[in-house]
Image (tube, rainbow, N blue to C red):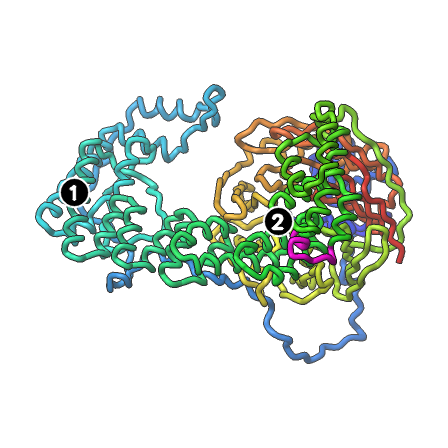
């Protein structure tokens, strides 16, 4: 540590990853110079005259250099005076927080107990003799030279160069050594077929080659260099397995294998050895659907369910077979983890209406817990004769789920709840075209009652006004259906007299992404209330994190609704905007509390040790990571319980990003700086792609942040940024200044930049086809105090900006309009 004239400098003995956005300090860049190394808070020109070992700081537009000599060295221990302290004996408060518990045990991929045999690993067969080494011919040298000269990606076809292992495997199989290996494998196959013909089925099945290993030989670039493995016992493999190598089997031999396995299956089936017959179908013929039907036919329901889940068959099929196996709890957990309730209910209803109805109620209760009250009501609307029991959900949705309010108000009228008639009329009179259309959609499926007819009549009048001015398109069927519902002759004459042709178009509103020039705003500093984080809730209210001072719920005009004493540094908002997770740092642990808008309550949940977390969640599951593990936590459980996890990642996770439909995280090898980007489809938690990225792929870029679709925002030494994807060509965007902070989604990117004149702006850009557009929204932040933090986040189609002094701004990115400008006063 160095104590300089204007600052302190802390240098670690080795490189260390530090999140400087959470501390009051600037990161230092290590740059080469003529005599060694220079440290700087900004990028310096390639040719500079600063001395080696000095620190260069930008102060008021000028560069100042400080020599890092021994006389400026200091130790933090000098700041600590422990003379008045003594060591106290304390009692333990309990064990530190443990890793999340996975509440669904994975399917055992090799179930030996089904066959009453010991669980042992496979052993290698010992046939044939060692192959003597041959000489490397000149053609090998030429071929290897040509391979090394090939570009990584063919500029014409776009295909990537095969790996060196694939290349070597192919060359060996083309050589004399390959012919020897082929002869050994052919001898192995002859022996295996003889075992089948002699009736030694147990030995034959242990030596059998799965059809996928043989079938892939024609297209495989990685041929097997040895003999197939011989199993010690015959057991059904439940987990999906993809052959890492294949055996050179011709088309005729492949047909012979298939016929041999079919005969073995028929023989085992006739003799009543159903589990071994299922082994032939699944492990040898690789006909998993047929194996599944066979197991169900012989009432092996548990094995069938494990096979369906392990082989990653459709979620509907997995759930159905767990229902058949009598494990309804696991079926519901799988439906919940995959978010495929509707599909599962449709499948199960064809076989068991009672189970399907029970699953529908489970789904409805889960949706209500998530805050999606409209979905909860729709799930069971037709399943209950007494719909009034749904009124608590309808009431909660009207109060907290703004987007569903029109439909839920109409459903309340369907239940003859006149208490909400005036609220519906008020919404219709003051609502926009979207809300009117939502009301119409709900009316079209409603019975004719006096309350419904009166509300529909008013809705139709406003609907016709919107059509006349061109706000929405005219749909004759909707208007005709509403006329039948209202049965109003006056309205019918108005519809006939209305010239719909003039209104049969929609005036396209000015879109921010279509603007040729950016919209410009200037933010002023007036606030005086310390805040750490802000989110906008579904009803338009704001939730403010104030660190150790607590949490505040306020209206858009700043009026306080509730205040909570629980400390909060970060807020993780649910997709429906009516629930949130409240995070506060406790040394190396994080205390997590739960907030619910409906009850305006905060409750304690758990303590976690985490490295990365998703900034939003679906209301049901929250994604976190620590080390080389990723968990999806059940937010409704009493403790940290995982519904899904990945625990065998090759490297630690350093970044994690999520949207409603995608999850991505990055693993980095600290030794080689190589990256792996993992991409999943949500909510099914299905792995789409695992993309290795080397330093050669990144070229001269440094990863800056990760988007939910797996693409990265990268920065180069010239302060140009780009959206990086290894498979897609990218274009650079010049920032014309120092990048301070960024936030991005799949469609928008916001960057905070400080230029050479010390002016600070937040520039918002549109992302399309992996290209960053010119600036669409330019927000001047120069007048805000620089010793306080300015933060922002992009949520859906809005950007929320807040300053730690108590200012909040919210912009709508569809048209660039400033929708909220709030000053918080303590």
Q: Which residues are magenta?
A: 411-420
Q: Residues within 10 Å of mark 2 (few under 14, many from 20)?
A: few
> Residue 486: x and y, percent?
69, 42
Left or right position of 622 against 243: right
Q: Which residue is mark 2?
A: 447
- Mark 2: secondary structure: loop
> Residue 232: x and y, percent?
22, 56
> Residue 300: x and y, percent?
29, 59
Camera-side residue: 568 or 357? 357
Position above or below: 601 against 619: below
- The image quadrant of residue 251 is top left
Q: Which residue is mark 1?
A: 260
Q: Confirm whether the magenta stretch covers residue 415.
A: yes
Position above or below: 147 against 5: above
**Residue at 49% from the left image edge and 61% from the top image edge:** 102
Q: Main secondary structure of the magenta part?
A: helix
């Amino acid at each position: 540590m160095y104590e300089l004239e204007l600052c302190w400098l802390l240098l670690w003995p080795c490189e260390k990853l530090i999140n400087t956005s959470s501390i009051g300090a600037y990161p230092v860049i290590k740059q080469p110079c003529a005599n060694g190394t220079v440290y700087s808070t900004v990028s310096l020109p390639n040719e500079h005259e600063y001395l080696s070992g000095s620190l260069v700081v930008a102060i008021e537009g000028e560069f100042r250099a400080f020599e890092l000599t021994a006389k400026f060295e200091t130790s933090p221990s000098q700041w600590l005076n422990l003379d008045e302290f003594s060591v106290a004996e304390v009692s333990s408060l309990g064990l530190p927080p443990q890793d999340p518990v996975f509440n669904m045990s994975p399917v055992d991929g090799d179930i030996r107990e089904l066959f009453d045999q010991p669980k042992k690993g496979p052993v290698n067969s010992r046939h044939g003799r060692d192959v003597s080494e041959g000489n490397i011919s000149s053609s090998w040298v030429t071929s290897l030279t040509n391979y090394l000269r090939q570009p990584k990606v063919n500029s014409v076809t776009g295909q990537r160069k095969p790996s060196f292992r694939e290349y070597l495997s192919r060359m060996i199989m083309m050589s004399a050594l390959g012919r020897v290996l082929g002869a050994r494998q052919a001898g192995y196959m002859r022996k295996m077929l003889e075992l089948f013909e002699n009736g030694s089925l147990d030995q034959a099945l242990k030596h059998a080659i799965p059809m996928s290993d043989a079938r892939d030989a024609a297209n495989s670039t990685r041929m097997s260099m040895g003999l197939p493995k011989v199993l010690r016992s015959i057991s059904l493999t439940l987990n999906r397995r993809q052959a890492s190598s294949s055996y050179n089997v011709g088309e005729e031999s492949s047909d012979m294998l298939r016929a041999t396995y079919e005969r073995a299956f028929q023989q085992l089936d006739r003799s009543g050895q159903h589990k071994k017959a299922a082994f032939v179908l699944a492990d040898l013929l690789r006909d998993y659907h047929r194996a599944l039907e066979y197991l169900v036919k012989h009432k092996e329901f548990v094995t069938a369910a494990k096979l369906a889940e392990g082989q990653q068959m459709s979620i509907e099929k997995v759930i159905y077979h767990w229902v058949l196996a009598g494990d309804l709890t696991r079926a519901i957990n799988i439906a919940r983890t995959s978010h495929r309730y509707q599909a599962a209910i449709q499948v199960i209803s064809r076989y068991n209406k009672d189970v399907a109805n029970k699953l529908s109620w489970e789904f409805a209760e889960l949706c209500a817990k998530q805050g999606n009250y409209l979905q909860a009501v729709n799930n069971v609307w037709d399943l209950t004769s007494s719909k009034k029991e749904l009124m608590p959900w309808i009431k909660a949705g009207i109060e907290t789920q703004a987007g569903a309010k029109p439909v839920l108000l109409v459903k309340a009228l369907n239940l003859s709840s006149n208490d909400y008639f005036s609220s519906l009329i008020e919404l219709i009179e003051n609502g926009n075209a979207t809300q009117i259309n939502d009301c119409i959609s709900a009316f079209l499926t409603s019975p004719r009652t006096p309350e419904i007819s009166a509300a529909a009549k008013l809705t139709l009048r406003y609907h016709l006004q919107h059509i006349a001015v061109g706000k929405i398109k005219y749909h004759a069927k909707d208007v005709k259906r509403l006329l039948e519902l209202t049965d109003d002759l006056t309205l019918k004459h108005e519809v006939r007299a209305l010239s719909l042709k003039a209104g049969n178009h929609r005036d396209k509103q000015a879109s921010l992404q279509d603007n040729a020039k950016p919209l410009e705003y200037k933010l002023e500093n007036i606030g005086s209330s310390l805040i750490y984080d802000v989110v906008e809730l579904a009803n338009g209210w704001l939730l403010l994190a104030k660190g150790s001072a607590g949490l505040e719920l306020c209206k858009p005009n700043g009026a306080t609704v509730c205040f909570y004493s629980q400390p909060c540094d970060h807020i993780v908002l649910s997709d429906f905007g009516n629930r949130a997770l409240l995070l506060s740092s406790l040394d190396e642990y994080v205390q997590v509390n739960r907030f619910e808008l409906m009850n305006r309550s905060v409750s304690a949940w758990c303590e976690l040790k985490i490295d990365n977390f998703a900034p939003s969640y679906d209301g049901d599951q929250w994604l976190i990571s620590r080390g080389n593990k990723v968990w999806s936590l059940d937010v409704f459980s009493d403790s940290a319980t995982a519904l899904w996890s990945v625990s065998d990642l090759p490297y630690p996770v350093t970044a994690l990003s999520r949207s409603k439909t995608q999850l991505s995280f990055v693993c980095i090898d600290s030794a080689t700086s190589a990256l792996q980007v993992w991409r999943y489809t949500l909510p099914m938690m299905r792995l789409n792609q695992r993309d290795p990225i080397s330093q050669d792929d990144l070229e001269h870029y440094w990863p800056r942040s990760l988007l939910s679709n797996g693409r990265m925002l990268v920065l180069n030494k010239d302060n140009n940024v780009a959206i990086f994807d290894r498979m897609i060509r990218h274009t650079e965007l010049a920032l014309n200044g120092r990048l301070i902070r960024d936030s991005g989604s799949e469609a928008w990117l916001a960057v905070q930049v400080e230029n050479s004149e010390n002016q600070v702006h937040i520039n918002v850009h549109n992302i399309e086809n992996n290209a960053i557009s010119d600036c669409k929204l330019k927000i001047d932040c120069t007048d805000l105090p620089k010793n306080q933090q300015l933060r922002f986040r992009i949520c859906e189609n809005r950007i929320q900006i807040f300053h730690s002094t108590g200012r909040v701004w919210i912009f709508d990115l569809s048209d660039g309009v400033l929708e909220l400008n709030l000053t918080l006063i303590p």
